[in-house]
Structure formats: C-alpha cells, structure tokens
Amino acid sequence: MARVELVMPKMGESIMEATILKWRKKIGESVELDEPVLDIATDKVDSEVPSPVAGTLVEILFQENDVVAINKAIAIIETEGSATASSSSAPAAEVPFVPAAQPAQAAPATTNTANGSAASDKFYSPLVKTIAKTEGIALSELDKLPGSGQDGRVTKKDILAYVENRGKQNFDGPYPQPQPQQPVAPSAPAAPIAAPVSAGVSTSGAVEIIEMDRMRKLIADHMVMSKHTSPHVTSFVEADVTNLVNWRNRVKDQFKKQYGENITFTPIFVEAVARAIRDFPMINCSVDGTKIILKKDVNIGMAAALPSGNLIVPVIKGADMLNLAGLTKVVNDLAGRARKNQLKPDEIQGGTFTLTNVGTFGNVMGTPIINQPQVAIMAVGAIRKKPAVLETEYGDVIAVRQMMFLSLSYDHRVVDGMLGGSFLRRVADYLEQFDPNRAF
C-alpha cells in the first residue's frame, strides 16, 4: 500500500490559504482519480479539490471550517501501489502524517506553535490571527477564548462572536469579558481616533451590527489600497448608441436561434473596448515602481454582482481575438457561473483592463475605482432615450436618440488626460459607428 498526501492546492498568486467548506468523502470511502474529495473557499471563489490518485481515503487532517495554508496536507489517500508516501505538490516533511488511530487529529503542537506564536502553544489559523490583529485582541486575551473547533481550536465563528459581544458589559455568553474602556463624558474634547471605534455602544439601541464577510473585507482592503496607490482621474463622454440598440433589438431572436445564446449589450461593449485597447495599447499596462509593464494580451475583466451583494470580476482572456458570437458565449458563461459561485480561480485572474456596467442598476454614470494592478477601468451607464441634435444635409434637427454615458477612471501616474480621454472617446466612436447592417 502507498500513502499519498492530498494537499491544499495553490489557488492563485495572491491566495495563500483556503477554508474547507465540506468533505464529500468520509474516512474509509473509495475515491477515483480526479473525483472531488472536498469543497474549499478562498476570499474570491469556491472550488473543488479532486483526488490525484485512485484509492481509499484513510485520514482527514483538517475539519470543515478550518483555514489551511496552500501546499499543506489535508488528507491521506491509500493506494494499491507499493511506493512510499509522497505529496503531489509539497514535501512530505512539511506536514507530518497523523497516526492512523487518530484520523481526525490536527498537526502536533510543534507545528501549531510555529504557525501561531512563540508565546503560545495554541494553534490559530491565519484568518483568526488577522481578525484578532484587526480588532486589537492581544494574544493573552485570545488564549482565554474557548473554541468550538477540533481539540478546542478557536474558529472564525468563535472569534467573530467574541468580537461582536466584546463591548457589551452585560454579555452572559461563554466568552470572558475584557476590561471595559472608560466612557468619555459628553463635554470632553474629542480625541484623535487612531483605530475604528467599537460599534457596541448605542444610546438608543436602534442599530444592527453586521460583521463583514471575508469577501467584503477583501474588497474593502483592495479599494482602499487602490486609492492609496493610484492618483485617480475620471473622464466622461456621452455616446449616441441608437444604431447599436436598433441592431440588437432586430437580431436578438435570430442570434438566440443560431447560437443558443442571449445577446446582451455587454459583449458589444467588450468588443469596442478591445478594439480601442489595440489602438491605445498604453492603457493596457501596470506599474512596478518606476517601470511600466505593457501587457500584450487583452484580458478584460467584467464586474459581476453576486447573490451576497459582493462583486467579483471574471476575466475574458484574449478578448480581442474573439468575434461577437464568441464574446457573447464567454460573457454569458462567466456571468452565469459567477452568480452560482462556480468560477475557477484562474478565471478571475490575469485581467489587464476592467469594464463595469453601472447601468444595470439604473445609474447613468459612475466613477469606478481602479482594479489594481491595472491602470484603468471603464463604467458604462444606462441607455436612455433623450432628445439630441442631429446634423443633416438639410440642417440641424432635434430627434429622440438612445444615449448613454461612458466614464473612465485612470491612474494619472502613467495615463495622462490625453491618453485617457482619447481612449474613452475611441470607445464611444466605435459604439456610435456601429454598423446596423452587420452580420453576427
């Protein structure tokens, strides 16, 4: 028999850990090659972990809701071969095997101490330690928390419950009550605030404290980082997209019949953006210190809303190489799987430019925040009928037209007004000059 480690897979360059959502297999059950063994979640997507071999699941090293670093062994699969135990993507010595008599036991205390703190022999996951650091919870205070996880481990749920009730002096829960801070008298002068004030104090009680989920925290950090990194400038143009709207209304039924896809405005916008990027390639870059990294691939991210209210940005790879039918298929596929939390990690990475459609929510324009490390992001507003002046051979006339606003936020370190404004105008030109007689 050979024992093979199933390790936490690497989910992307910036992802260093994942949470175990659900074990699909139990100890003693057989698994096939590439058969999903468990479901995991990162800050961005949920994913399945397939088995690298066919065999029997004999040990589970971490339980559901545990947060595990990438390349750590999470289970042991026994095969029919005679080779020694090996890991598919990490050295076997990095995480020692758990004795067979204790199949659900976590790694020993020496490993826990290294992952926790030299002053404590208790193991804390990276997520728990991050929350503790953010909330100003000292290690000595954290050590007193009873955990509901395996072997009394403090889980995310435990520490969030503690944080929520930390400021309530009459809290009768299982967590020890820290020393309350002295209240500030109403007449006292306001002191500088170095850290967020606890929301646990309310004079009326008419508040609800909602803890951010992990994705919302990630989005918040990313947006603040973007504003600190890039000096944002936003330009606007208004485009007459009457020909585009009329064309789509005329062909959408035939398009659905021929390709089996509903054609929305998004792939048309993506097509125009991809063409404009080829005209102005310097908009398709990133910044590394004093170096400009010009991207040859045109990978356009499209912001999509999740059922939770959070946003995710799946990426259309090689958007400039796809025709309108191909773009429609990719857009519909990514948007549909985004709403079902079925995107793969590599489908939300590698973007070089981002498009967001604020018109979906009935907004006419927006000032989006740059999706780092990109240098520009474009927002498209709602298409609305408006009176507009048209130049004809018989003179100017006023007519009802389909109009929309486009806005471009760009990094003024490397994108000046001429480049940003010219690029945005070119996108609008492509939309306005849309051929109403074009084929798919």
Image: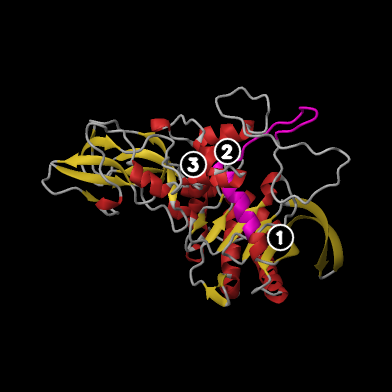
Residue that carries the numbered disc 1 in the rendered image: 406
Q: Position of residue 14 (x, y in %)?
A: 47, 57
- Amino acid at dot 2: Pro
Residue appearing at x 23%, y 37% in the figure: 99
> Which contiguous range is marked in magenta?
200-225
Residue 370 lies within the magenta run: no
Q: Would you place residue 320 above or below residue 349 in this image?
A: below
**Residue at image coords 57%, 38%:** 307
Which mark is first along the chain, 1 or 3? Answer: 3
Task: Depth check: give the residue in front, 154 or 379.
Answer: 154
Q: Is residue 166 visible?
A: yes
Image coordinates of residue 402 in percent, x first then y, are 74, 54
Query: 318 and 410: which one is in front?
Result: 410
Residue annotated with mark 3: 341
Tell me the number on the disc at residue 307. 2
- Name the residue type under label 3: Asn
Question: How far apart are labels 3 and 2 at the CA level?
Answer: 9 Å
Quarter of the image for residue 231 reads: bottom right
> Percent position (x, y) of residue 365?
74, 54
